[in-house]
Amino acid sequence: MPNGYFGCFWEDGFETILKKCGRVPIAHPILRYGGERFITRSPHAFRFSISFQCQAHCTHSHARAGVFHTPHGIVETPRFMPVGTLANVKTVTPAQLKETGAQMVLSNTYHLHLQPGEDIVERAGGVHRFMGWEGPMLTDSGGFQVFSLSEMRSISEDGVTFRSPRDGQMIHLTPERSIQIQNALGADVIMAFDECPPYPATRQQVEEATDRTYRWLKRCIAEHPRSDQALFPIVQGGVHLDLRREAARNLAALDMPGYAIGGVSVGEPPELIEEIVKATTPLLPENKPRYLMGVGTYREMAQAIAAGIDLFDCVIPTRLARHGSALVQGDRWNIKNARFREDFTPLDASCPCYTCQTFTRAYLSHLLRSQELLAYTLLSIHNITELIRFTRQIREAILGDRFTTEFADWLQPETVA
Ligand SMILES: [Zn+2]
């Protein structure tokens, strides 16, 4: 193998094959180099089956369009990722999900640990097989959910102890345990176990949480043996831009396969999210994907993309659907509203989704008023398609260098009517 092999390798590329070893398929990278193919089992080579290529930069903002390669396929960025908390995106089948344009899907470590338990998911062949989703997947670390249980938890340097809301049992979650669970679940991207401080919090509380998150990251890295899973660290720091910048610099120095910004969308005013993203993103490596956790509104996504963010997730499309609301070209409509009862037009005539291509607003209104379960499926299909379509349109605009003009309205602060 020539010296500098890995440097040259990027120009030649790679492919991944799945080889069945026992019950669980293992990804083996085939490297193409100088017209020859090499199969390697080197864990260092494995790392390279996960990569990010930047395809275009916007000349008027920090926005970029790229491709994130994972062992289960590609994610074209910028992209919205739907959330499948308990290894399912609520009321939507994987086949329907694929039709929405979804590429990467999330699942929650905390919820899957409580039910059915990671052992069962692992014995099923991993979370992809368990839920029937063949594309890229990401699991969060459980940190956000555990820290949301403010009444039922205690934090120490070792980890967090909390009472299971399911059966009242005490559970101790540590950085090591979170990684072990995520290794068993087997998603393509896994998240470092972090301490997410609440909003509002004192500066001292935020500083302690940010420092602990960094110490916990080191333990996550030490515990993570699988090079076919990309471990993303999470930038914390609350609304304190200096803490955010320091955290971003510390994490960037570790050369991880991707980076996340967490601890936003926890109750702070939306304009602070933009400030945090603008302060943090330029300090993260240019050649790695950047993921803004828990954000999924039109304006917040557009502004974050302008600052250089690539990936988003949010429960908003399915949660709104369960409340009878549809996202239509930037607005939220309550479909139970009387004006839709006799409206025989599609929800959005320009939308390519199954719901808009097949049904009328009057029919959706009828299903919701009758509390028919199909209503939630049809609205979820539309709402997920809508947010993915929004990020895809931004991606197209970046590729054509039209982003800041085409999406100018979304890049302004929200005007209060
Ligand atoms: Zn639609």
Image (spheres, helix red, strand yellow):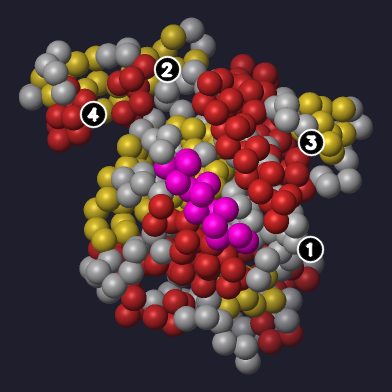
Q: Nearer the viewer, mark 4 or mark 3?
A: 3
Q: Any mark on residue 155, and which?
A: 3
**Could you give the CA–CA distance between mark 1 and mark 3, rounded to whole angstroms?**
42 Å
Q: Indicate which label's residue lies in the foreground, 2 or 1.
A: 2
Which one is in front, 133 or 150? 150
Q: Which residue is mark 2?
A: 26
User: At numbered mark 2, what does the secondary structure look like: helix, strand or loop?
Assistant: strand
Measured along the vertical axis of the image, is residue 334 above or below residue 155?
below
Viewed as shown, does residue 83 lie left or right of 32? Answer: right
Location of mark 4 (residue): 14
- Element type at mark 1: loop
Q: Earlier in the sequence, mark 4 or mark 3?
A: 4
Q: Is 122 contained in the magenta span? A: no
Q: CA distance from mark 2 to mark 1?
A: 44 Å
Contact, CB < 8 Å: mark 1 with mark 4?
A: no
- Distance Cα–Cα, label 2 vs label 3: 36 Å
> The residue under label 3 is which amino acid type?
Ile
- The chief SS type of the magenta part is helix
The residue identified by callout 1 is 371
- How far apart in space, not on screen, are marks 4 and 3 (Cα)? 43 Å
